Image (cartoon, grey):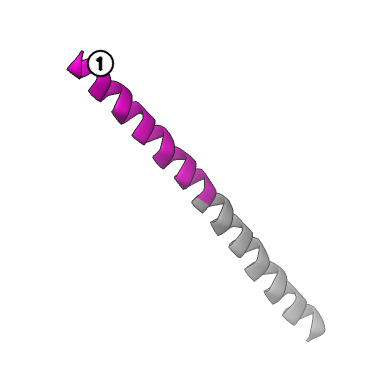
Amino acid sequence: MKYLFAAFCVTWLVLFLYMVSIARRQREIDREIELLRRALEQRHDS
């Protein structure tokens, strides 16, 4: 039963770390999209 609990904990830890990495990548993508949007607006206004 100890191994089952350990596997359960490890699974949730891995899932949590995966979700954190996805959130970090999403923030980076959002920042890049905003930079591209601003660059396009500047080109359009010029």
Q: Residue at x 35, y 35 (%)?
A: 34
Seen in the image, is 15 located left or right of residue 4?
left
Q: Residue at x 46, y 46 (%)?
A: 27
Outermost front residue: 46
Rendering coords of residue 13 (x, y %): 67, 67
Seen in the image, is 26 located left or right of residue 36?
right
Outermost right residue: 2
Q: Quadrant of the C terminus?
A: top left
Rendering coords of residue 32 (x, y %): 42, 33
Is 29 within the magenta?
Answer: yes
Picture quadrant where residue 40 is located: top left
Determine crowd level at label 1: few under 14, some 14-19, many 20+ residues with C-alpha closer than 10 A: few
Magenta stretch secondary structure, dominant: helix
Does residue 2 sit above or below 31 in this rendering?
A: below
Q: Nearer the viewer, residue 4 or 36?
A: 36
Q: Residue at x 51, y 44 (%)?
A: 25
Q: Nearer the viewer, residue 46 or 26?
A: 46
Which span is picked out in magenta? 24-46
Disc 1 marks a residue whose amino acid type is Arg
Rendering coords of residue 2 (x, y %): 81, 84
Identify the residue under disc 1. 43
Q: Residue at x 73, y 81 (%)?
A: 5
Rendering coords of residue 42 (x, y %): 26, 20
* Label 1 SS: helix
Q: Quadrant of the N terminus?
A: bottom right
Seen in the image, is 41 located left or right of residue 29?
left
